[in-house]
Amino acid sequence: MPTNAGKVFDEALALPADARIGLIEKLLTSLNLPIQPEIDRLWAEEAEQRFAQITHGETELIPADLVFHEIRSKYQK
């Protein structure tokens, strides 16, 4: 982190929680990221597509216990 950013960060940590939250919101807004309603819309669209794939038999469902078993087998070495 550049020196100026580190100084700003340290000063931000000294702010009360509500002021830090306001600062976070302003910084996030400055990044021009998709806003929450747009994110929600995209997730809903994705969920609908996945549901359609399942109901039309276009995808294979794998039981969770099998998935977790495979993960444990792979990483518990």
Image (spheres, rainbow, N blue to C red):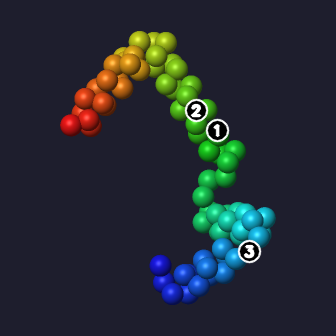
User: Horizontal placement of 62 versus 50: left or right?
Assistant: left
User: Could you tell me which secondary element the residue under label 3 belongs to?
Assistant: loop
Identified by mark 2, the residue type is: Glu
Identified by mark 3, the residue type is: Leu
Answer with mark 3 or mark 2, whichever residue precedes in sequence: 3
Q: Position of residue 60 (x, y in %)?
A: 36, 17
Residue sticking out furthest to the front: 77
Q: Which mark is residue 45?
A: 2
Which mark lies nearer to you, 3 or 1? 3
Marks 3 and 2 in Cβ contact (< 8 Å) = no
User: Horizontal placement of 4 versus 37: left or right?
Assistant: left
Q: Quadrant of residue 47?
A: top right
Relative to 47, does residue 16 appear above or below in the rendering? Answer: below
Q: Position of residue 64 (x, y in %)?
A: 41, 20
Q: Which mark is residue 1?
A: none
Relative to 29, does residue 47 appear above or below in the rendering? Answer: above
Q: Position of residue 73 (x, y in %)?
A: 25, 29
Task: Identify the residue at horizontal 35%, vertical 24% (top origin).
Answer: 67
Task: Identify the residue at horizontal 70%, vertical 77% (top origin).
Answer: 14
Marks 1 and 2 in Cβ contact (< 8 Å) = yes
Q: Which mark is residue 15?
A: 3
Residue sticking out furthest to the left: 77
Identified by mark 1, the residue type is: Arg
Give the residue at mark 1. Answer: 41
